[in-house]
Image: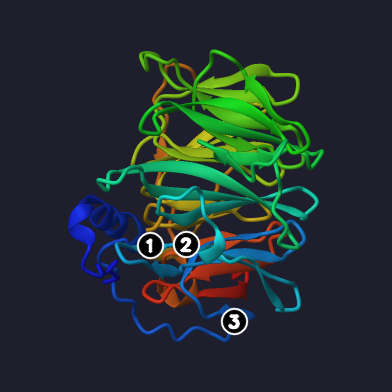
Amino acid sequence: MIRFRSPGALPRAPQLCALLFLLFSGGLIPRARAQDLDKPLQNIDEEITAFSFAPDGRIVYSVRRTIKTKKYDLQHDDIWLMESNGKRRRLLQGEKFNRGNLPFSYAVDAFHWSPNSREILAQLFTTSVIDDSGRTQDSIMTLGLEDNGKEIHFGKSENTIPDCFNATWLKDNSTIVYMTETVKPRMLFSFRYYNVATGPAGPAFEGRTFIDSDRIPGTNAAIAVERNRAMTGPPRLQRLELLSQDATEVATLDGYQGGLSVSPSGTKVAYFIDREILEVRDIAAPDHFVRLRVGLGVFHWAPDEQRILLKRATERKTADIVWIGIPSLPAQQPGKEVPILQPTPQPILHDLTFREFSISPDGRLLGVVLPGKRNLMVFPLPN
């Protein structure tokens, strides 16, 4: 169990201590079995909170760091970059990253690389003390960094974008499209633009609200799940042209639980319609789809799109990782019951458990974060 300890002055702000413990420690961490894995290509022996492969194969990652003050124990993650040759450079020293005069904690949630592998967006979950009584407030902000560690200043002087979820770079490596909360907590979002040179550029798809989105690789388009603000209608799958702000409906969904992911070729999309069923759909022929009973989890596409790699637990939870085969996508007849297939999972890495994982954009490497110590190991992608 990892705890944020108090130096004795915490009675003025007990809620911060409790909140930081729940949010950043994860509470009880399952004890990992002996991780007698084959020798990895890389092993980063740190407490990793997030990582991401760049399009060129490098890895950006964050390391949990704590700062002790007279009143609080705070978390300020460091951010590092590992080159292809294994050399590592620190891009951000968390201890020096401050916002105003009142204390705050942050953990890196996710990273988003620009297409040219030169700029990085780091999504931060923050808990800030907002007054002298010790009241706290949670928020999301996104920090911009160049791969040399220089801060990206959006417009005039700000190096962060507040209330910025799931940010993505467009192909010009300068324009950012992100989601901002419309219905809390994280129920519905709207889109906004930001430009590195000029700053905020206003709303996108104004008046429309969405549950989730994922970029179509190599394009300025995305697939998104739209739902009306009253949440009375069904979720609808949309193709969004992010520059022209054109939208084309792909399909009306029977449900949406999460996990929206576009395949590497941009021809298929997969998502959970409930806590058991993964639906995989052809974007160009949306009546061609299949439903698989695999259980809710986190997944990534194999390069050939014939399989997905599934961690059989939600984010930040520990579970084994298995291959799930994707069959051909047949045409489904309107009004007829859609059959639910139950594929046979194929475990990898000795059937051991992991906290996080990701496949490199070129499909050659697999990164996994182990439970407990949370070090990052990189392997050739197993068959």
Left or right side of 86 for 352 = left
Q: Give the residue type that dot 2 points to.
A: His
What SS does tag 1 mark?
strand
Q: Which residue is mark 2?
A: 76
Residue, disc 3: 40
Residue at 78%, 36% (x, y): give it. Answer: 197
Residue hosting label 1: 74
Q: How many marks?
A: 3
Q: How busy is the neighbourhood of tag 3: few (under 14 within 10 Å), some, or many (20 plus)?
A: few
Give x and y (percent) for residue 130.
35, 42
Circles 1, 2 touching at the beta carbon (< 8 Å): yes
CB atoms at circles 3 and 2 under 8 Å apart? Answer: no
Compared to residue 85, the image places residue 15 above or below, namely above
Q: CA distance from mark 3 to mark 1?
A: 32 Å
- Residue 1: quadrant of the picture: bottom left
Could you tell me which quadrant the C terminus lies in?
A: bottom right
